Image (cartoon, rainbow, N blue to C red):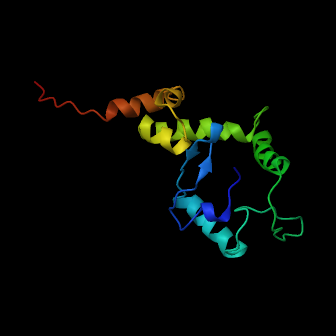
Amino acid sequence: MPLEREHYGEAGAALKVRAKRNKTGAPYATNCPADVLAAWLSARGKAPGPLLWPINKAGRCMPRRMTDQAVLSMVRKPGEEAGVEKFSPHDLRPSFISDVLDAGAGAATVSGLAGRASITTTARYGWRGDHAKRRAAEMLHVPFGGP
């Protein structure tokens, strides 16, 4: 389901996103994404229709839905610049899940954000690098009186 203007409210609001098999997710636009969306919506206006529009080479907003190919190009270009050979918009989802898990959110919370039906599916993305494992270990404080 494409994002529509009515799927987003004010800054910090949840986006209503349909995931696989018509499950819905509710990622929140906070911090920088909220600022970007606020700037976009002030230019876009409140008219119903697609939340995001393409912008032509002259810098004009085109009030129509972005094509799948346009989204793919927008995602692939920075990926290629970063040296990632194969990259698609779907790759952003597991990256989001891993990053939010690494930031300390629980699997159940992340599962809801991603529109997952099962925490087990979300937990597959729960691999952690050494830095994240060390941060997790540092969360537990065991008092030691010393000699």
Q: Residue furthest right?
A: 57
Q: Residue at x 61, y 60 (%)?
A: 7
> Which of the image's four quarters has the C terminus?
top left
Between 100 and 137, the residue placed more toward the observer is 100
Q: Residue furthest front?
A: 22
List x then y, in percent, for residue 82. 74, 40
List x then y, in percent, for residue 146. 13, 27
Q: Is residue 128 above or below residue 83?
A: above
Please give left or right for residue 81 compared with residue 58 in the image.
left
Q: Is residue 133 above or below residue 78?
A: above
Between 141 and 109, the residue placed more toward the observer is 109
Name the image quarter holding residue 43.
Answer: bottom right
Name the image quarter holding residue 51.
Answer: bottom right
Q: Residue at x 44, y 41 (%)?
A: 109
Name the image quarter holding residue 106.
Answer: top left
Q: Residue at x 49, y 42 (%)?
A: 112
**How many numbered marks appear?**
0
Q: Is residue 44 above or below residue 134?
A: below
List x then y, in percent, for residue 117. 52, 34
Please give left or right for residue 100 compared with residue 69 in the image.
left
List x then y, in percent, for residue 61. 81, 69
